[in-house]
Amino acid sequence: MEKYRILIAGCGDVGSTLGKLLATEHRVYGLRRTINKLPAQLHPIAADLSDLSSLKNLPAIDILVYCAAPRRGASGVYTQTYLDGYRNLLAALPETPAHVFFTSSTSVYAQSEHQWIDERSSASADSEKAQIMRAAELQVLASDCPATVVRFSGIYGPQRLHLLNQVLAGKSLLSDPVQYSNRIHRDDCAAVLEHLINLVAKGNSIAPLYLASDCLPSPISEVMDWLASQTNSPVEKLKSTRSTTSKRCDNSLLLATGYQFKYPDYLCGYAEIIDSL
């Protein structure tokens, strides 16, 4: 396998986890505003993707992984992060990368009747932020270099405990109406990207789009009830105020590449997290 120069732009939780995986075989740069939190294995680049003037003297790279995440805020922040930031970075790089990976979200899907969705399903979510994400996907896929978009479902992990914290605070949801949820462990997010990058490094062709979600879409009430039972947490069943859609993500295309999930369902993923509490 050829050793690649890889730049992870927006190197936060997922990016740092990915960087540590890749650094054993490749030269990896991590770009973020503050570099003190970057793993030691990464070559740090302090820059702001939304500020073109800060993107100076960037190295030539083979692979770009664009996994920036916006700070909470209005839709303008999403535009700066996903559209403007990507254009700024490509303009600042001394050479066009051989392949770009862009991390997106299943929020681009609007399906709400519990149907199964995959890479061929319509991505027509009508929220402004989802539309910006979809526009960013199309921008990446229209780039001059080969590109792959990876749509992650809800990410959970050691530093992403929102759902578990709700249960520990005594909250769960009523099972009616049914609202399916999809998730992927942070470590699988990183491992999926590593897997696809290594396929490219070995000369394999990959698809322009993958849906990355674990193997067990489940009603959100079912997940929360299980978390409550595993943590012996008394909970109050509340009516859902979530505005999210209800769909089930099909990861068959990703599995066909040979990827094997570290945490194929929420049961094993959350069990490890609960054991560490």
Image: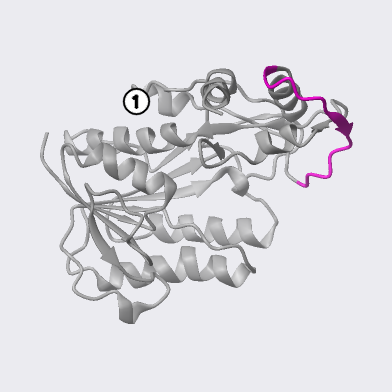
Residue at position x 56%, y 29% from top? 277
Tally of marks: 1
Q: Position of residue 5 (x, y in %)?
A: 16, 51
Q: Position of residue 126 (x, y in %)?
A: 70, 56
Can residue 142 be seen here? The reply is yes
Say whether residue 123 is visible. Answer: no
Tell me the quarter of the picture where residue 237 sits. Answer: top right
Quarter of the rendering containing residue 216: top right
Which segment did they paint magenta? 230-243
Residue toward you, 84 or 59: 59
Where is mark 1, residue-wise? 257
Q: In the rendered view, would you say 108 is above or below 263?
A: below
Tag 1 secondary structure: loop
Q: Look at label 1 and name its amino acid.
A: Thr
The percent position of residue 254, horizontal first and vertical second, equals 42, 28
Mark 1 Cα-neighbour bin, 10 Å: few <14, some 14–19, many ≥20: few
